Amino acid sequence: MADQVGGHVRNGMLSLDELLAVMDRAAANLERLQAVWERAGPMLPIGPSGGSTPEYEDLTRTWGDLLRGLPKIDDWTITERLPDMHAIGMAYLEYAEFGEPPFGLMDASDAPGKALAEYRHRLNRARRRAVRDRMQELVTKVDTLLPQLLADVPRDSLERLEDARASEVDAAIAEIERLMGATASRRGRWSDLHRHMHFGQGHDWHDIYELDWPTLKPDIEAAMFSEDDPLPVPDIDLGRAASQRPVGGASTKLSWNKLDPDVFERLLHDLLRNLPGYQNVQLLMKANAADRGRDISAERVLHDGAGGVRTERVIVQAKHWLSKSVPPEEITSALTRITLWEPPVVRGFVVATSGHFTPDAVAWVERHNEAGKVPFIDLWPEPRLTTMLSERPWLVAEYGLR
């Protein structure tokens, strides 16, 4: 595997599995460095002294050897060597002679630990970046298969479920755990889930669907979306710039042509996650690679005046159309695909476009809704998206729409 991975690295290509193998090895080397530092750190002098010890010198050599096992992350890696024990002790002596507090020495003594923390942060961030798309596919797969698997299974069934879909769910969850690595804490019912999968009876799978799986999603989401890379900004003082009373007007038009269909879908996904009343927002698998619409699933939370709360399933279809308006046949065609994502029943259907809808499409949707048919259809044309995004300027900036 090492030769194979090395060959792909030299060619500038890595599969996801190969990249994760490299990251896992880097993480293992990082833990070895951490162990070295935990032994070496307490040996450093905290006052005037001289000389070093054979054990500390050996740890210094080991540290240097292990540094070669940390590949660069965004052109950065740890270069700090362990502090020189003798130099630290003698520097404390100089500080004592001048009567100054040894703050600089404290920083030098802490530098290896801070470098380890920085590398761990960057490694986890890179892993999240690498696995996000695949994890979304797997979560959608589990969400789709679980209700299908249990459609005809009694809640109290004691029979072991012999269904190929159960094996698919098992494999998908195993891969999700592999992709997560150490990027997020496991706070959900992971042990309960594995116990239920082991026994695999009908009631176990109901527990997985109703109790276990929902508690895992926050962990999985944390492993995908803890994005902390800042957007590039100029080197200015915003307060001073504002005090100069800048002239001119503010742009209102969004540059939709900067997005491709996949990025437009991701924008809608992030917009829904930031809209009040929506939860459990997920990108769905592409049921047909050739279709011109991409689907997002969400739950809409509805409150009534008496304090009651209920949720309903909503499917959002993204249509990144710039050159023509969406006609009614596109909407009727999309409705036929709704059943692919049931159960649970889809109560709402949103069609969102970066362009517009034809008058015929708007009239057809109005007739459909007035007849009380399910799902209720909501149209989000470009002006409506622009309004929603104007209230969330950070999304406009993140996606480079201005």
Image (cartoon, grey):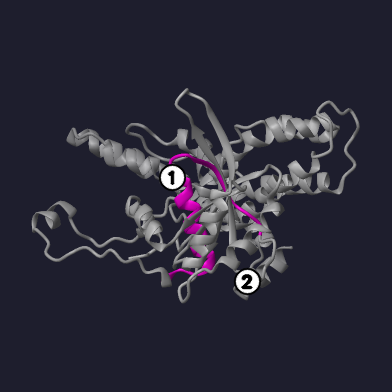
Q: Secondary structure at mark 1?
A: loop
In this rendering, position of residue 185 left or right of residue 273: right
Q: Quadrant of residue 204?
A: top right
Residue corresponding to mark 1: 275
Vertical order, 371 against 310 (above or below)? below
Could you tell me which residue is drawn at 45 percent across and 56 percent down? Answer: 79
Q: Amino acid at mark 2?
A: Met
Residue 62 horizontal/vertical position (percent): 56, 49
Instruction: Give the residue furthest to the left.
Output: 244
Residue corresponding to mark 2: 13
- Quadrant containing the C terminus is bottom left
Q: Is residue 186 visible?
A: yes
As for residue 99 lying within the magenta part, the answer is no
Circles 2 and 1: CB distance less than 8 Å?
A: no
As for residue 284 lying within the magenta part, the answer is yes
Residue 116 horizontal/vertical position (percent): 48, 46
Could you tell me which residue is drawn at 42 percent across and 36 percent down? Answer: 44
In this rendering, position of residue 238 left or right of residue 8: left
Q: Which residues are magenta?
A: 258-285
Viewer-closest of 173 and 70: 173
Q: Secondary structure at mark 2?
A: loop
N-terminal label among 2 and 1: 2
Vertical order, 141 against 2 (above or below)? above
Could you tell me which residue is drawn at 91 percent across and 32 percent down? Answer: 159
Viewer-closest of 72 and 258: 258
Viewer-closest of 359 and 217: 359
Residue 393 horizontal/vertical position (percent): 33, 54
Vertical order, 198 against 74 (above or below)? above
